[in-house]
Image: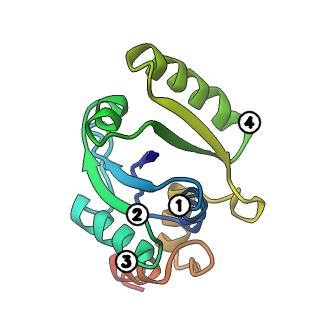
Amino acid sequence: MRALYPGSFDPLTLGHLDLIDRAARLFDAVVVAVLQNPAKQPTFSLEQRLEQIRRATEGIPGIEVGHFDGLTVNYAQACEAQVILRGLRALSDFEFELQIAHTNQTLAPRVETLFMATAAHHSFLSSSVVKEVARFGGDVGHMVPAGVAIDLERLFNR
């Protein structure tokens, strides 16, 4: 069985990586796919985000890295994923994610959404928080993979 883990991953955090690692133990293949959202101005280019994910997941079997624009369910069907994986950090995430899951089910009834709770020690992490800490010179080494921390340091000239 194949799972799709979509997101902007701008940047990839240890919370994302935890979910990827755990999902890799549950599914034959996990496609980690960067959504190109025209409504957002990403900090890192698509190519940089794809490379960050590849570097961070190179030791995890069954991981594929891709990108898409448009509807997630359409990409799930195109990459033959039966499951869309979504991480939950807090109750507030659940309300939004449940609405999206219900919408996706009306569009592609054969594609299931699976919610996975983020590990408690990563529950405070978001890409936005990581970028804010890095922008002001804080240490993000406990928030992101080592390669991403280096990329953030370069980006903010620290």
Tell me which label, 2 or 4, sits earlier in the chain: 2
Element under disc 1 = helix
**Amino acid under disc 4:** Leu
Kindly report the distance in space between the C-alpha atoms of the residues bearing marks 1 and 3.
16 Å
> Where does residue 117 sit, x and y in percent of width and height?
70, 48
Q: Which mark is residue 91?
A: 4
Q: Which mark is residue 55?
A: 3
> Where does residue 32 sit, x and y in percent of width and height?
39, 55
Kindly report the distance in space between the C-alpha atoms of the residues bearing marks 2 and 1.
7 Å
Element under disc 4 = helix
Q: Nearer the viewer, mark 3 or mark 4?
A: 3
Q: Nearer the viewer, mark 2 or mark 4?
A: 2
**Amino acid under disc 3:** Arg
Kindly report the distance in space between the C-alpha atoms of the residues bearing marks 3 and 4.
31 Å
Few, some or many residues within 10 Å of mark 1 (<14, 14–19, 20+): some
> Where does residue 5 sit, x and y in percent of width and height?
45, 48
Q: Please, is residue 47 above or below residue 77 in the view?
A: below
Kindly report the distance in space between the C-alpha atoms of the residues bearing marks 3 and 2.
11 Å
Q: Nearer the viewer, residue 93 or 119?
A: 119
Tell me which label, 3 or 2, sits earlier in the chain: 3
